[in-house]
Amino acid sequence: MPAHEKPPLASMALIGAVATTLSLGLAWAGGLIGPHRISGGDVATALEDNGGRYPGYRRAHAKGLCFSGSFAANGEGTALSTAAAFRPGSYPVTGRFSLGGGNPLASDGRNVFHSMALVLRTPDGQEWRMAMDHTPIFPVADVPAFVGLQKASTPDPKTGKPDPALMKPFLAAHPEVTAFQSYMAKAVLPDSFANATYYSINAFRFTDAAGTTRFVRWQFEPEAPLTGLDKAKLADLPRDALFKEMIARTAKGPSRWHLKLVVANPGDVTDKATVAWTGPHRSVEAGMLTLTAVQPEEQGACRDLNFDPTILPRGISPSDDPLLGARSKTYSSSFNRRAGEGAHPSAIGQDIAKETAR
Amino acid sequence: MSRHPKDFHPLLRLLHWLMALMVLAMMFIGVGMVSTAGPLYPALLAWHRPVGIAILVLVLIRLPLRLVTGAPPLPADLPPPQKLVAKASHVLLYASMVAMPLIGWAMLSAGGYPVVVGGLVLPPILPHDLAIYALLRWAHTVIALLFFALVLAHLSAALMHGLIRRDGVLRSMTSGHRR
């Protein structure tokens, strides 16, 4: 094209249209335009708004303690999955006990999730990450309901309690939350991290050597007999009671849990963590978890890990439960936030340091 | 292989268009993935990593090939500043294609994540360090957006050559010139 001629308008318009379309497309893919979607950051923010903002800590289950140990597989699990962790042998485990809630300085005297997270590593370099709670069910089935619950249960600054004007309509729309609340009110609240059963919460797909796929929920059942806290006297519990009990207990000897793999019956709900599986189920005992040492988070290996329950070895994959992807994304957003804020000393570590200095 | 001096090597052309699709797809997958906690998230994540590593493998084939086979000369009537911008933008495009997957891999390593691609566990390329993770996570986003802007500029310039200047530059990467 000679320099004195004007560029053809149609061509200019076409080039502009291509660039604009791609840009708008990217903005749409990124959720900047178009229908609103809930991001992991939205969930992390809802948690911060509910429980307070504590930079450097996990947005949920902020109060924790690291542990280490091993998982001894007896080989039975290979009937359900080709995962290397089920082959007979002993595999190192890094874990974390925690209490529900976003406040790393909260008291242990609360009727909330007692949780155990694990990373199980096998020699082939694969990892099985788990984030489990002491209840077999979860209060909500999906991410909109989770965010809704955080918003509805945010304490009113005036009363320190959730605003009934928000909570009542939320509960009316979510009977599963009411069901969970009545379960929590009745269920035993373990008086130690060591005597609780920890549940996978969601169902997962296990694939065996023949390629057969089954839905499985698993649980770690403690050797220590379950005893409960007096729920009427939770407020009297010293702040770090559960954590100190676990530290003292471990100084005397290891704690153990049996891993049970529970196979879904036809008709079992596999995509909603709010629904328990009841009645007889095929169950496979796959091995034993032995916890041999605990460490405050600043000394342990658990603080800077994301216990994303969708990080799974070959032979195990996520089910179609939408909560799993939501957990994965939310944990990731929380991990990114605290990584950017810089790691902070753990509340329990600080308390122990203060007492030792005395 | 004989080719017209005004054209890129045929294998380079093939790699270019294949990677153009992959890079654009990665950008859409990437921004889609970080913007949702919905059911699409695991699927997008499952695509993002293997495609990223595939881009790294392909660019490591493409870059030496490009250095050996060279590029056809730019039109003689193109002003020197435009020539400079054209060359610099290509250096940046190649740098981005190499850097983005490496930063992603390094970022996951620093975050303590296992880097699993297509069932294969890749070794970590950085130690587990939360501060390094945070820096790389930020860099991965910022460079991705700059890369997208660069791709738009590259595409617009290519169309300008093809539709307005009609100087054979676009054809050197598409159908080629008749011998």
Image (cartoon, grey):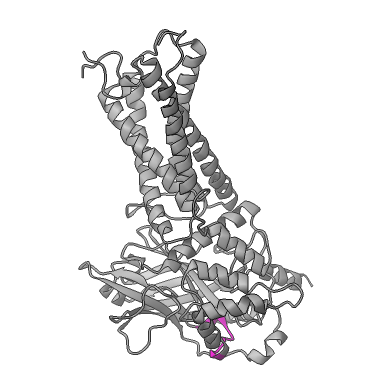
Up-down: is B5 above or below A57? Answer: above
- Note whether residue A81 is visible: yes
In magenta stretch: residue A37: no
Residue A14 percent coordinates (x, y): 41, 28
Residue A5 percent coordinates (x, y): 45, 10
Q: Main secondary structure of the magenta part?
A: loop
**Image-quadrant location for residue A88:** bottom left
Residue beneath the point at 30% across and 27% down: B12
Numbered range of the magenta stretch: A186-196
Is A163 left, or right, of A316 in this rendering?
Answer: right
Residue beneath the point at 38% across and 59% down: A126
**Image-quadrant location for residue A2:** top left
Which quadrant: the N terminus of chain B? top left
Which quadrant: the C terminus of chain B? top left
- Note whether residue A195 is visible: no
Residue A293 percent coordinates (x, y): 54, 72
Is A69 left, or right, of A62 in this rendering?
Answer: left
Residue B81 percent coordinates (x, y): 52, 14
